[in-house]
């Protein structure tokens, strides 16, 4: 089940980079900000109704809500707003996905001092191989980019926001389930986006079926599926293995961008795909072996205590 969840996570997370680019090409008079607002506002209303009607938030304290609201401001509002801004500024979808590709290395450096976790030698090798693959993927797309150099600040900002949100979530006790967590994050993001959209004149949505199809797709997959799986996998496989999966986002996005948007896909890009896959495999195999060793240690300690 974890393998299927990981694959679904990579695909759904990658779709978040493609939706605004595809919508900009196919929907008349749509801005990335307008699409982002109407990706979150209807979904926030739906999730709040579900949480209230099912009693899913029973036992959740104000402190829990405040903590998750802060995480949501970074992990969803800050991250998604910066990604959409980057794509709106003309940064290629595969290049924008670089934010997910650099994140695993930064997280690996920080998990020790911030969380007291150890990244093993084999995992470092996998992370570095995956990073090399990502650099090849992104380098193959930079030549065709028409974005202003300052536009590349947006992906860096998005990366920083997601890292902060991830560490805040990892350090907090999991007192809220995934549904309640998503409801809080989505609602906070919607509330933050509304005044910004009003200021920039992007609050009124276009009256087109294609716009609402794009908004509905963005709500279902990059938001519900991707973020739901992100927080679930964070608890299930740990922060290092989860972030290693992000190495697969840039290649997946680049491949889909080539197929759907005509973005360049070269032999160097394909070599980058192979390196990314090899890096992720190395990290996940190391994590699985470490989990097996830990389980054996616990079993032996329990047996010794009984004797």
Image (cartoon, rainbow, N blue to C red):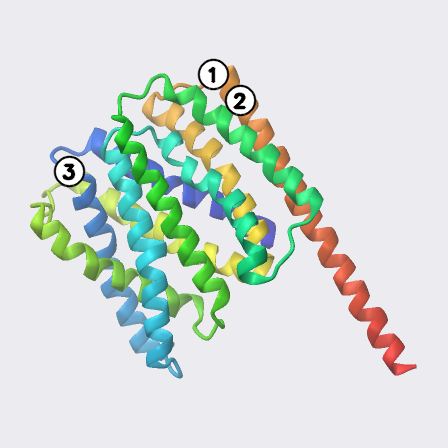
Residue under pointer 1: 266
Residue under pointer 2: 270
Give the structural element (helix, strand or loop) at label 1.
loop
The residue located at (34%, 56%) in the rendering is 74
Q: Nearer the viewer, mark 3 or mark 1?
A: 1
Q: Residue lying at the far right in this picture: please name it.
A: 307
Which is nearer the N-term, disc 3 or disc 2?
3
The quarter of the displayed image where residue 31 is located: top left
Which is nearer the N-term, disc 3 or disc 1?
3
Vertical arrangement, residue 19 with respect to residue 300, above or below? above
Residue under pointer 3: 30
Which quarter shows the C terminus?
Answer: bottom right
Q: Distance between the residues labelled 2 and 1?
A: 6 Å
Give the structural element (helix, strand or loop) at label 2.
helix
Q: Give the left or right position of residue 70, taking residue 85 as reference.
A: right
Give the structural element (helix, strand or loop) at label 3.
loop
């Amino acid at each position: 089940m974890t393998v299927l969840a990981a694959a679904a996570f990579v695909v759904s997370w990658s779709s978040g980079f493609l939706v605004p680019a595809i919508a900009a090409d196919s929907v008349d008079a749509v801005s990335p900000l307008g699409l982002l607002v109407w990706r979150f506002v209807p979904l926030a209303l739906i999730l709040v109704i579900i949480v209230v009607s099912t009693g899913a938030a029973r036992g959740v304290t104000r402190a829990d809500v405040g903590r998750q609201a802060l995480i949501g401001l970074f992990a969803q509002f800050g991250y998604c707003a910066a990604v959409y801004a980057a794509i709106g500024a003309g940064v290629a979808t595969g290049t924008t996905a670089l934010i997910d590709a650099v994140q695993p290395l930064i997280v690996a450096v920080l998990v020790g001092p911030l969380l007291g976790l150890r990244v093993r030698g084999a995992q470092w090798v996998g992370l570095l191989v995956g990073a090399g693959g990502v650099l090849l993927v992104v380098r193959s797309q930079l030549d065709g980019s028409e974005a202003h150099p300052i536009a590349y600040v947006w992906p860096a900002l998005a990366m920083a926001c997601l890292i902060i949100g991830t560490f805040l979530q990892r350090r907090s006790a999991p007192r809220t389930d995934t549904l309640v967590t998503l409801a809080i994050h989505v609602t906070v993001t919607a509330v933050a986006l509304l005044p910004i959209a009003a200021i920039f004149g992007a609050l009124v949505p276009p009256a087109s079926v294609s716009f609402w199809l794009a908004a509905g797709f963005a709500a279902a997959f990059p938001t519900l599926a991707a973020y739901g799986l992100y927080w679930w996998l964070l608890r299930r496989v740990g922060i290092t293995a989860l972030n290693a999966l992000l190495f697969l986002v840039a290649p997946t996005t680049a491949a889909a961008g080539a197929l759907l948007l005509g973005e360049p896909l070269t032999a160097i890009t394909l070599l980058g795909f192979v390196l990314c896959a090899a890096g992720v495999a190395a990290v996940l195999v190391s994590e699985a072996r470490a989990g097996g060793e830990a389980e054996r240690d616990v079993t032996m300690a329990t047996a010794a205590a009984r004797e």
